[in-house]
Image (tube, rainbow, N blue to C red):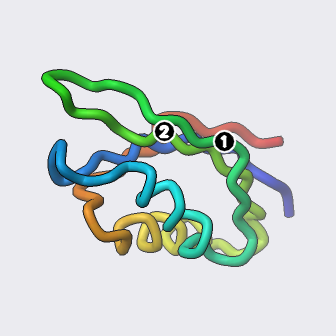
Amino acid sequence: MGKIAASYDIMPESTDVPLDSVVEALKTKIPAGVSIIDTKIEPVAFGLKKVVAGFVIDDSDEMIGSKLEDAIRSIPGVENIECTSSAVL
């Protein structure tokens, strides 16, 4: 199979969630077959910020996308995630 590059917006539950902790948790929560290529914290509105994370995903496991999203949602303080772009490498 191949590899996919994907970008996700990771929204916190509130402005009180320490986004640096979310970024650190990503490193330990992502499943095998996924690597982080970039993370940044960006403003949304009214003091709310989000984490934008880029991943390279090995698609030999057809459930890897669901596993990645479940792992991100399991991070304390994460309310919502959205895949904003993806491309086959």
Cβ atoms under marks 2 and 1 closer than 8 Å? yes
| Residue 50 point in image, percent of width and height | 35, 38
What is the secondary structure assignment of the residue under circle 1? strand
Task: Please state if 75 lies on the left or on the right of 69 as rendered.
Answer: left
Check residue 83 in the rendering and tell me which mark sits there, or answer none. Answer: none
| Residue 75 point in image, percent of width and height | 37, 69
Residue at mark 2 to residue at mark 1: CA–CA distance: 8 Å
Residue 2 versus residue 87 in the image, above or below: below
Give the residue displayed 55% in from the left and 35% down from the top. 85
Number of labelled discs?
Answer: 2
Residue 13 versus residue 25 in the image, above or below: above
Q: Earlier in the sequence, mark 2 or mark 1?
A: 1
Mark 1 sits on what residue? 38
Residue 67 versus residue 12 in the image, above or below: below
Give the residue displayed 26% in from the left and 50% down from the top. 12
Mark 2 sits on what residue? 52
Give the residue displayed 53% in from the left and 36% down from the top. 40
Quadrant where the image shows the C terminus: top right
**Residue sitting nearer the eye, 4 or 80:** 80
Task: Please state if 29 lies on the left or on the right of 13 as rendered.
Answer: right
| Residue 63 point in image, percent of width and height | 58, 74
Give the residue displayed 74% in from the left and 64% down from the top. 59
Mark 1 residue type: Asp
**Disc 2: CA contacts within 10 A as few (<14), some (14-19) or many (>=20):** many
Quadrant where the image shows the N terminus: bottom right
**Residue sitting nearer the eye, 2 or 25:** 25
**Residue sitting nearer the eye, 23 or 59:** 23
Task: Please state if 76 lies on the left or on the right of 20 as rendered.
Answer: left
Mark 2 residue type: Val
**Disc 1: CA contacts within 10 A as few (<14), some (14-19) or many (>=20):** few
| Residue 2 point in image, percent of width and height | 85, 57
What is the secondary structure assignment of the residue under circle 2? strand
